[in-house]
Image (tube, rainbow, N blue to C red):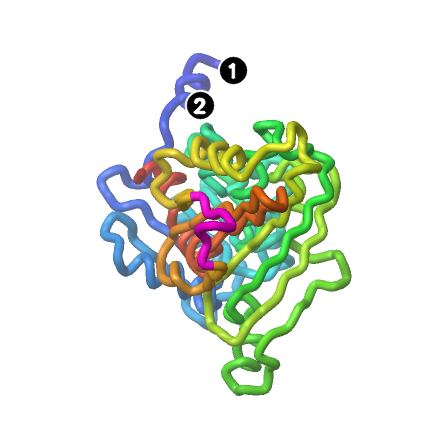
């Protein structure tokens, strides 16, 4: 590498025209996540959003020409289409924009940065420095936020038989599920993913730092958006037999000072109301973490509450976009 090459490699990434706002293209902006991202962009003044004509969406040359004009592409596409677009971006050489993929396609792929800025103290910096970031899934966001700090602290062994239960609003199921619920033909509540092979399991296992595949039981209810993710624990089976207060302290320390993640006050069998509803954070990019513990029974339930379209999808994408473009 020449000295000039080294200086170029060390130089910060700037918008293509340093005097202009960074430009963004949302590929798949008509889908649920894409629409949520565009709505959030309406509240921002520091980015310029470019779109492709509807009749050019499958025109590879037109898409490539547009991507050469932007600083970042956000993919809100099915997995196969996301892989095809990433291959096109990879072929663009120095003209290639950064890419943020909201699909499942690259969440555990080598060379991609996982877009959960609160995952670890240095994760936000990794996202800032990356040209390829995978936006997390909604369910994994809650599960990983609860489990990873406890594994890192040694309170939950990496091979612990973790069970994860969750309920989401029907907007997380895509256009067909939305149509079914809004037409009144869907059941008011149902479990799914009972084949033990839900698409969110690989990223949950990897980024929660688990070595044993967790059991994950998702469900959907007759409400549009909102989510609860819960992890039950027998405290007397954990290393050192920690109390609920011990678990709470680890979570509180990990997320201290975070803008979007809050650890709520510890609740035990003497103080809890025994109820938690999923819709309280709708329309936000917030994530709330709860520890419900019973000293009497040496049991605890960890719960994450978020908007599956907010911190679980579009809100997280905008947060990652701002990091990748140096806007925050």
* Magenta span: chief secondary structure: loop
Q: Give the image location of residue 252, x and y in percent.
A: 43, 35
CA distance separating discs 1 and 2: 10 Å
Rendered view: 43 above or below 126: below
| Residues tagged 1 and 2 counted as in contact (Cβ below 8 A) | yes
- Tell me the element at label 2: helix
Category of crowding for the residue at label 1, using alpha-carbon neighbours closer than 10 angstroms: few (below 14), some (14–19), many (at least 20): few
Residue interval drawn in magenta:
266-273
- On screen, residue 224 versus residue 165, left or right, reads left
The question of residue 44 being in magenta is answered with no
Q: Give the image location of residue 42, x and y in percent.
A: 28, 60
Which residue is under mark 2? 9
Frontmost residue, 323 versus 259:
259
Which residue is under mark 1? 1
Q: Is residue 177 visible?
A: yes
Q: Nearer the viewer, mark 1 or mark 2?
A: 2
- Tell me the element at label 1: loop
Query: What residue do we see at 59% from left, 86% from top?
Result: 185
Query: What residue do we see at 46% from left, 64% from top?
Result: 277
């Amino acid at each position: 590498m020449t000295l000039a090459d080294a200086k170029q490699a060390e130089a910060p990434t700037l918008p293509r025209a340093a005097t202009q706002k960074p430009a963004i293209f949302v590929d798949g902006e008509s889908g649920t996540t894409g629409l949520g991202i565009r709505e959030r962009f309406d509240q921002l003044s520091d980015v310029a959003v470019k779109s492709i004509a509807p009749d050019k969406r499958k025109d590879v040359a037109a898409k490539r020409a547009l991507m050469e004009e932007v600083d970042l592409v956000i993919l809100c596409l099915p997995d196969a289409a996301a892989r095809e677009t990433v291959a096109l971006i990879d072929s663009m050489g120095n003209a290639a924009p950064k890419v943020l993929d909201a699909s499942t396609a690259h969440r555990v792929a080598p060379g991609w940065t996982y877009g959960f800025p609160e995952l670890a103290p240095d994760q936000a910096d990794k996202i800032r420095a990356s040209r390829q970031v995978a936006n997390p899934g909604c369910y994994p966001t809650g599960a990983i936020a609860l489990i990873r700090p406890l594994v890192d602290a040694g309170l939950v062994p990496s091979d612990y038989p973790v069970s994860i239960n969750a309920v989401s609003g029907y907007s997380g199921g895509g256009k067909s599920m939305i149509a079914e619920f809004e037409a009144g033909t869907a059941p008011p509540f149902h479990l799914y993913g009972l084949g033990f092979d839900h698409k969110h399991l690989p990223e949950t296992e990897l980024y929660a730092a688990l070595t044993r595949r967790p059991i994950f039981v998702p469900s959907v209810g007759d409400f549009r958006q909102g989510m609860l993710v819960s992890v039950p624990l027998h405290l007397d089976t954990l290393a050192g037999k920690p109390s609920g207060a011990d678990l709470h302290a680890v979570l509180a320390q990990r997320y201290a000072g975070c803008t979007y993640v809050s650890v709520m006050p510890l609740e035990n069998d003497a103080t809890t109301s025994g109820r938690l509803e999923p819709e309280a954070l709708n329309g936000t990019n917030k994530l709330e973490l709860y520890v419900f513990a019973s000293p009497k029974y040496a049991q605890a339930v960890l719960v994450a509450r978020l908007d599956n379209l907010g911190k679980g999808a579009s809100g997280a994408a905008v947060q990652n976009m701002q990091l990748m473009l140096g806007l925050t």
